[in-house]
Image: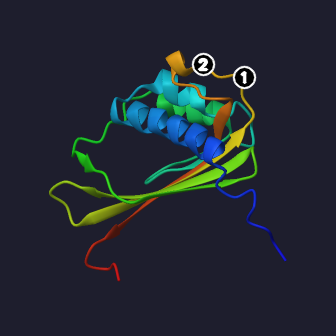
Amino acid sequence: MTSSINVNLPDVVAEVAAAFASYERALANDDSILINALVWQDPRTVRYGLDDTQHGSEEIRKFNSGSHRISTRIMEGTAILTTFGYDCATVNTEFAFENSDLRGRRTVVWARIGPDSQPEAGLHCGWRIVASHDSVISDRLAP
């Protein structure tokens, strides 16, 4: 039997929401410095992109050093944030591309493993991305 007493504790949800908002802004602005700061600096970090894969923070840093800004504006959509205890969280988002029949999906796994909070730098309570996965599907194929 599992207990949900430590799922979505309000203070933890607020911390992860702030970290995720920083990440989304960094993606929108192609801010590779902040994106890299939010990524766990470890060879076990994984990123599965739309047309790319990186294993380890060094590969992710190299990938982020180039410009990857999406030319078509992304329209925000559904976001589901779930925290587990005080140190682990997932954020799942769905979004649409303007003037496209494609819908995107992003899963970001967060863990509290970084240094203390540095909100002025976009860092929040040590939360770092340990894994992420992006995918797209055509609206025509969606249920």
The answer for how far apart the CA atoms under marks 1 and 2 are is 8 Å
Q: Which residue is drawn at 52% across and 18% down?
A: 121
Q: Residue at x 52, y 42 (%)?
A: 17
Which residue type carries mark 2?
Answer: Gln
Q: Name the residue under label 1.
A: 115
The total of numbered circles placed on residues is 2
Q: Which residue is drawn at 19% across and 61% down?
A: 100
The image shows residue 52 at horizontal and vertical percentages of 49, 49
Q: Mark 2 points at which residue?
A: 118
The image shows residue 26 at horizontal and vertical percentages of 42, 31
Question: Dot 2, crowdedness within 10 Å: few (<14), some or many (≥20)?
Answer: few
Kind of element beneath mark 1: loop
Relative side of 33 to 43, left or right:
left
Q: Which residue is drawn at 75% across and 45% down?
A: 86
Q: In which quarter of the image is the N terminus?
A: bottom right
Indicate the quadrant where residue 11 lies. Answer: top right
Q: Which mark is residue 85?
A: none
Q: Which of 71 and 115 is in front in this view?
A: 115
Q: Say above or below: 18 vs 31.
A: below
Which residue type carries mark 1?
Answer: Pro
Residue furthest bottom as drawn: 143
Kind of element beneath mark 2: loop
Relative side of 60 to 1, left or right:
left
Question: Dot 1, crowdedness within 10 Å: few (<14), some or many (≥20)?
Answer: few
Q: Are marks 1 and 2 in contact (CB under 8 Å)?
A: yes
